[in-house]
Image (tube, rainbow, N blue to C red):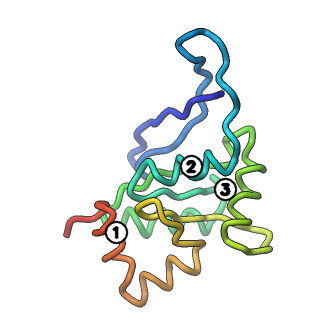
Amino acid sequence: MQFQQLRREETWGYYMMQGGSRSRSGGNMPREEPMEKVARVASESAVVIFSVSSCCMCHAVKRLFCGMGVNPTVYEIDHDPRGADIERVLMRLLANSSAVPVPVVFIGGKLIGAMDRVMASHINGTLVPLLKEAGALWL
């Protein structure tokens, strides 16, 4: 199994990058299922954005959170060899047959949704309380 390594990016917060580590015993660990990976990554930080690096909507949602003073963890699924599997899991979670399932945002380990749900929450004033509750925003 490949372990996720965090690296600090000045622009977007933390990016999840693929690393080539092995277990301490020297053997390979069993491969993590895509649904398990999504659940684990989503629960590891206050705000997690599943993104594609070339997606303009992903860029916009990252800018929204950074503009609010939130440091999201960004998981670029196009940098993951099993990104297509993760994308299918995200589409299933969204119960959406749209061709573009990203960005997908989790706050406090809970699925918020894609760009439309994030923007609706921001406009109707429910996004900031969610961020405060998750510990991503203090003001």
**Picture coordinates of residue 91, whole percent (x, y):** 73, 65
Residue 59: which disc? none
Q: Earlier in the sequence, mark 1 or mark 3?
A: 3
Earlier in the chain: of badge 1 and badge 2, it is 2
Q: The disc labelled 1 sits on which kind of residue?
A: Leu
**The N terminus, quarter of image:** top right
Looking at marks 3 and 2 on the same chain, the residue that comes earlier in the sequence is marked by: 3
Res. 32 image quadrant: top right
Q: Residue lying furthest bottom in this view?
A: 124
Residue plotted at (58% across, 20% down): 21
Mark 3 or 2: the one toward you: 2
Residue at disc 2, secondary structure: strand
Q: Circle 3 sits on which residue? A: 54
Density class for disc 2 (Cα within 10 Å; few <14, some 14-19, many ≥20) is many
Which image quadrant is residue 134 in?
bottom left
The amino acid type, in three-letter code, at marker 3 is Ser
- The Cα–Cα distance between marks 1 and 2, rounded to whole angstroms, is 18 Å
Q: Is residue 83 above or below residue 93?
A: above
- Left or right side of 6 for 135: left
Element type where label 1 sits in the image: helix
CA–CA distance between discs 3 and 2?
Answer: 13 Å
Q: Nearer the viewer, residue 119 or 40?
A: 40
Q: Which residue is mark 1?
A: 131
Where is 76 relative to 117, above or below? above
The structure residue drawn at horizontal position 65% and vertical position 64%, both measured from the top left corner, is: 102
Disc 3, disc 2: CB below 8 Å? no
- Residue underneath mark 2: 75
- Percent across and percent down for residue 44 are 44, 47
Nearest the viewer among 57 and 44 is: 44
